[in-house]
Each structure stands twice: as C-alpha cells, then as structure tokens.
Image: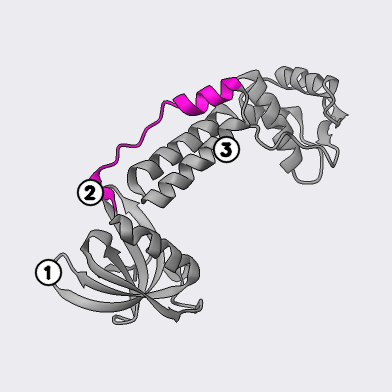
Amino acid sequence: MRRAERLIRIIQALREAAPGAVTAQELGRDFEVSERTIYRDVAHLIETGAPIDGEAGVGYVLRPGFDLPPLTFSYEQLDALALGARFVQAVADRDLVLSANEALAKIERALPATHRARLRSAPLYFAGSDEAKMRPEAFGPVRNAITDRRKLRVHYNSLGDEKSIRVIRPLALTCFGHVWLLTAWCELRSDFRHFRADRIERMTVLAESFDDEVGKRLEDLNYDDEPVAKSA
C-alpha cells in the first residue's frame, strides 16, 4: 500500500473508531506496517493540519468535525468501482449501462489525474456473454417492479417444458454465470421460487402492489437450511 493511501485510511480508521483512542499497534496490524511507521504517518498528518490528539504508547483520536474531501479513493476502491461498472456493462440493460457510465464520468471529473488514470485502466475485467443478458425490454420493468413492490404476471416455460401462468411478487435479480434468476414469492405455489429470466416468455407489470409480509420477504428466504427456494 502506498503511503498516500495509508494516510487516507488512517484518517478513515480514526473517524470510524468507537469512542476511545486507537493505538499505533492496532493501526499497524490493520495496515500491515510497523508501529514506527504509524508514528511517522500520524506525525505527518498532524503537521499537515489533521486534528489528531494523542501520543505514542497511548493512542490517537480524531477531533470531531474533520473530514476528507468527498471523493478521495484508494486504488483498491477505484478498482472495485471499475470492476462493478464493467460487470454492469456486460450483463445489464441499456438504462443501467448508461447510468453506470454517467456515474463513472462524474467520479472521474472530481479525481486527480493519477487516480483518474487508475480508474480508466484498472486491470480487472468481467467476461460476460449474450447468454447472461435478460431481454433488454424486460430488465428495467422487473427492477422497477421490485422497487415499487408491484406484482408481475409471467408466462413461464420451465426447463421441463411445463408452461404455466403465475402471479408473483418479485424480490431480487441474481446473475449466476450465464443465467439471470428472478427470485419471487409465487402465489400459485404459495412458496418462494427462482424463475430463469430466459424462460419467461411474456411478462406484465400489474397495477396490484404488495406489502412486506413476514414469511414472504426476501429476508425470510433461508439459503442455508431447508426449505430453500425451488426452481419454478
């Protein structure tokens, strides 16, 4: 980790710490450097105006009211942003892709030149495929239906070629390799179900909304114990 990034993270660690001083030993363990390095870093921060109180052997606290510039990122954070945007570009619909690109452009404009270059050249990529894409005309309405808690009527063709019409409560979208899965509460089966997006032949967003009901919410779906959501 470069020193400039470590200095930023020291400030973040002091700001986020529970009440009480943070010791150089704790900071050194978190950032994998020696206590002597932390002493030098803290001394440098104090010299540049950071309102840090404390001393070696006792610990350090950051006085209230001090903050970093709003768009200060480490290289690792920039890598995470770049990878997330590339994932969206590979698998999402046009509106979401445009939104990801606009968000990155806003961030780029506020970054110093070195960090801007890192964001553009982050060495992390996502290899998507057309198989992983939900139909563009369906992806946006499904996302909105999840947010607005609107029921969907889906004409579904299962992997066993069993066709059915279901009214469902959409809860989440998850990409598993080639396949997008829509997790929902299925009113036909009175249970959670996973619907493969590529097997949904037709879909209608209904005017009927739904409330959070215990037992029918995403947080009620237990992935570790039985019963788990079954394929539709």
Picture quadrant where residue 169 is located:
bottom left
- Mark nearer the viewer, 1 or 3: 3
Disc 1 marks a residue whose amino acid type is Asp
Q: Is residue 22 above or below residue 226?
A: above
Neighbour class for label 1 at 10 Å: few (<14), some, many (≥20)?
Answer: few
Disc 3 marks a residue whose amino acid type is Lys
Disc 2 marks a residue whose amino acid type is Glu
Q: Which residue is pictured at 37% across the width and 32% down the height?
A: 125
Q: In this figure, which residue is indicated by the disc labeled 2?
A: 131
Chosen colour scheme: one colour
Q: Which residue is pictured at 45% across the width and 77% down the height?
A: 215
Q: In this figure, which residue is indicated by the disc labeled 3?
A: 106
Place of residue 99 in the rendered image (x, y in percent of width and height, measured from the top left): 48, 47
**Mark 2 and mark 1: Cα distance apart in space:** 19 Å
Picture quadrant where residue 196 is located:
bottom left
Q: Is residue 160 left or right of residue 125?
A: left
Q: Is residue 13 left or right of residue 196?
A: right
Q: In this figure, which residue is indicated by the disc labeled 1?
A: 161
Element type at marker 2?
helix
Report how many numbered discs are placed on residues in the image: 3
Magenta stretch: includes residue 76: no
